[in-house]
Amino acid sequence: MARRETAARRYAEAAFEIGRSDRTLDAWERDLEALGAALRHPELRQLVEHPAVAFGDKERVLRRVVGDGVGEGVGAQALNLVLLMIRRGRPGAIDRMIAHFAELLRRERGIALAEVRTALPLDEKQRGAVAERLAQLTGQQVQMNEMVDKSLIGGIAVRIGDTLYDASVRNRLERLRARLTAV
C-alpha cells in the first residue's frame, strides 16, 4: 500500500510540475477528473487491472472511451500519464494519483479542503455561514465536503488537514461524562 501511495504521489507531482511550467493546470485538472470518472466504471476498471489482458488492448479501449488525446476528449499528456501507469503495472494507484494532484492544485490555489460532518443536512444559509467561518479560521478559501453523521446527535465536526473542530453534541456529552467520572 505504501508503495502505491509513493508511486501515486510521484506521478501526481510530475504532472503538477509539468502543468505549472506549461500553465496548463486547469487542463490537467479537467483531464484527470474525466479519466478518473471513466475508470470508476467497474467494467473498465476490471479490464485495466486485469493482468491477462494485453496492454495494447487496454490502451485501445481506454482511448476509445475517453478520446484519443487529439481534439475532443482528454488531453494527450494526461492520457499518456495514465497509460504509463497502466503499462508499469500501477493501475491501482491512478485514483490516489488523481486525488494527490487535486490536493496539490488546492494548495497552489490557496484552498483548504474541509470535511464537514453534521447530524442533519445543511441548508444553503447554514452552508454559507459555515464556509465563511472556516475561511476566517484558516485564512484560506474553503472547499467543503459535507457528510451527514447521525451519531453526532447534533452540532458539527470539521476536519481541515490535521485539525479537528468538534462542536458536536456527542463530543460535549463525552467531555461531560469524562469530567463527572473523574470526580
Image (spheres, helix red, strand yellow):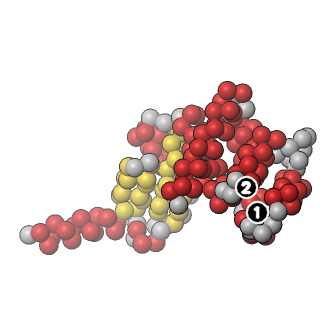
N-terminal-most mark, 1 or 2: 1
Residue 95 to residue 176: above or below: above
* Residue in the picture at 50% in, 56% down: 2
Q: Hey, what amino acid is under mark 2?
A: Ile
- Contact between marks 1 and 2 (CB within 8 A): the answer is yes
Q: Is residue 34 visible?
A: no
> Hey, which quadrant is residue 123 in on the image?
bottom right
Q: Which mark is residue 26?
A: none
Vertical placement of residue 167 versus 15, above or below: below
Q: Position of residue 81 (x, y in %)?
A: 73, 45
**Quadrant of res 171:** bottom left
Q: Image quarter for residue 45?
A: bottom right
Query: In the rendered view, does 166 fall on the left or right side of 139?
Result: left
Residue under pointer 2: 86
- Please state the total of marks drawn on the protein image: 2
For this rendering, which residue is in front, 51 or 125?
Answer: 51
Between the residue at mark 1 and the residue at mark 2, the CA separation in whole angstroms equals 7 Å
Callout 1 secondary element = helix
The residue lying furthest to the left in this view is: 183
Tell me the residue at 78%/45% (across/down).
80
Q: Measuring 47% from the left and 61% from the top, which residue is drawn there?
A: 117
